[in-house]
Every structure is written in structure tokens, then in C-alpha cells.
Amino acid sequence: MDVHAVILIQDIIGSFIGKLVIELNRKHPFLPTFRSFSMIHSFVMSVELEDISQMDNGTFSVSQTVRSEWRTIKENLIHIWTTTLELIAN
């Protein structure tokens, strides 16, 4: 795991959990930990302010395009982790 990966993980989830994730990655380097964070980070960075609107009740909503993109990323992450865990189990 390179320095940029460590910084990315710590920026997203904080230093304590980041250390746990890094330790997990050291013990089990075949887990797609960094790849997962990288996909989520790329998605978040691609969302434009125009895609976010505040509702009357104070909550936020995103455009249908963003919802669709997130659904695709979520399905990809589920597939990646499912495949990896199946490989570990066998």
C-alpha cells in the first residue's frame, strides 16, 4: 500500500479506523480494501454541486444521475467483495 493510499484512507474514515484498515491490508493484502476506498473517493469527487439540492425539511437530495452512478458503484463493490470472499472461503 503506497503513501497516497494511506492518506486517502485516513482522509475518508479518520486516523484510528485508517490504521485498522491498513493493518487489515497488511495481514490480508488480497482484500480489495484500497480499491474499494478509491472507487468511493472517485465517485464522491465526481459529484457536482448542481447535482445536490436541499429539500424543504433540511435534508439533501441528489440527482437521478448521481443515484444511478452510485447504484452501479455499489453493485461493483458488492461483486468485488463477494468474489474475493468466495475465493478466500474455497
Image (cartoon, rainbow, N blue to C red):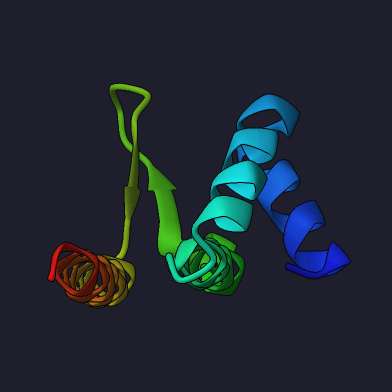
Quadrant in the picture for the C terminus: bottom left
Q: Is residue 22 left or right of residue 83?
A: right
Quadrant in the picture for the N terminus: bottom right
The residue lying at 69 percent from left, 36 percent from top is 19
Number of marks in picture: 0
The image quadrant of residue 67 is bottom left
The residue lying at 20 percent from left, 75 percent from top is 87
Residue 43 % position (x, y): 49, 70
The image quadrant of residue 18 is top right
Q: Is residue 45 left or right of residue 79?
A: right
Q: Is residue 85 left or right of residue 40?
A: left
Q: Residue furthest front?
A: 90
The residue lying at 31 percent from left, 47 percent from top is 61
Residue 77 % position (x, y): 29, 69
The image quadrant of residue 34 is bottom right
The residue lying at 27 percent from left, 75 percent from top is 80
Residue 78 % position (x, y): 20, 66
